[in-house]
Image (cartoon, rainbow, N blue to C red):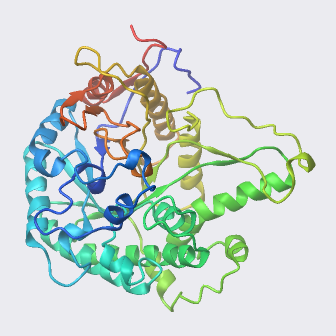
Amino acid sequence: MNTTLNTPFTYTFPPDFIWGTATSSYQIEGAWQEDGKGESIWDRFAHTPGKIENGDNGDTACDHYHRWAEDIRLMQAIGLRAYRLSVSWPRIFPEGSGAVNQRGLDFYSNLVDHLLEAGIEPHVNLYHWELPQVLQDQGGWPARQTAHAFAKFADTVSSSLGDRVKHWITLNEPFVSAYLGYYEGSHAPGHHNMDEMVAAAHHLLLGHGWAVNTIRDNVPDAGVAIVLNHHPFYPASNSAADIKEAKLWDGTNNRWYLDALSGRGYPQDVVQQYGKPLDFIQIGDMDTIAVPLDYLGINYYTRLIVRSQEIPDHQNEPVSTFPGEEHTEMGWEVYPSGLFEFLDRVNREYSFPALMITENGAAYPDSVENNKVHDHNRIRYIAAHLREAARAIEAGIPLRGYFYWSLMDNFEWAFGYSKRFGLIHVDFETQERILKDSAHWYRNVILTNQLTLPPEKPE
């Protein structure tokens, strides 16, 4: 399957392949103070001057909290079979734990009912970075009690929705929550503390393990997963220093989570690099984290090329690995073959029973012309990655589905509303929605269950 986008190519996916899109609650819902919802760490972070591009915040976002019926009709227009949504923790527990906000639960229950009536299977993600601010004030994810609170949250939501929802995700991208939130600082809560990062990474996974068992108790026929964001890391040259740096980044971003979830513990090279005692790990924690999953969700956008920081550049070998010419508006290299490479690696090196592409997408500078959005670059991006998904299936990798990120343009975290990933264009002033060309193209893929590569240029 060594085709290029210039080569005629058609592939029919398995009949039970899942086609969907994904969103997250903070990025689309708005209604940040309505119906008893509490403050989240993203509410606090986005309201802090200087944290978000253009001073944007998620107070209104796509107003999905009020416009969900219209959004479901648009999902139907795209022909979606599945929809990955997240639940706002502070909408259910305004204080992080304790009293349940029934109005919050009712919102998601009503949404699930109408999705099912529309023939769209809900895949519910419990945590997409919306920690209640109350829990952050009490220590956040570096504190073990937050993992306990998350298990209670998982119990409450799965008890309420589990009679109808059979597809569950515990966490989205725990690496991002831990690293960008507690060390690098560009995400909420915006800390810069290595000790907090390492403890947060562990307690996120611990909360995941407890949540899996809780969901299965409440929904015996549930399929349960966790979603990780993965990058293949390439050394910038063949020097020992660059190879070492790439391996370390692979360890912190990929192996730390894959190894622990697979019962191997944390990778020792990363533990040694951190130089921390990990005294927050208690007896039985690693067994809890390694609870069997029904599938692993993989979010893939690009690869990363790594240059050593340990030696001066002039003492290192010349750079020999260069990014390609095409990049998205995020500055991310378009590197579709990395998707196959990582699916293949996870399938060979780990023992997850199945894999799902739970996010894949691209931001481009879309514009509206005569009430249309001609986003041919996005179509080509999706097609190139679906080609790699087809390649994986042909290679025997148990890939079960594909969720495009995102259903609609939304609040893109620290970038605010400056980056558009959606199949649906949103005017954030009027809330008008327009199906982009990519939405119509994706609809045809879903209806035919086939990928036919688009032309190099729009016809």
How many labels were placed on the picture? 0
Image quadrant for the C terminus?
top left
Q: Residue at x 72, y 58 (%)?
A: 247
In the picture as drawn, the residue positioned furthest to the front comes out as 49
x and y percentages locating residue 237 in the rendered image: 81, 44
Q: Residue at x 45, y 73 (%)?
A: 205
Relative placement, left or right, of 375 versus 105 is right
**Quadrant of the rendered image containing residue 253:** bottom right
Q: Residue furthest top?
A: 459
| Residue 102 place in picture, x, y as percent | 9, 72
Residue 437 vs 215, above or below: the answer is: above
- Residue located 26% across and 80% down the image: 152
- Answer with left or right where residue 160 lies relative to residue 269: left
Residue positioned most to the right:
315
Q: Position of residue 351 (x, y in %)?
A: 51, 62
Vertical comparison of 386 with 235: above or below: above
Instruction: Tell me the quadrant of the picture where the N terminus can be found.
Output: top right
Question: Percent position (x, y) of residue 50?
Answer: 45, 55
Work out whether residue 351 or residue 255 is closer to the camera in this orientation and state it.
255
- Name the residue at 78% across, 56% down: 309
Left or right of residue 238, residue 1 in this image: left
**From where the camera sits, is residue 213 visible?**
no
- Relative horizontal placement of residue 389, taking residue 57 as reference (left or right): right
- Can residue 391 be seen from the camera position used here? yes
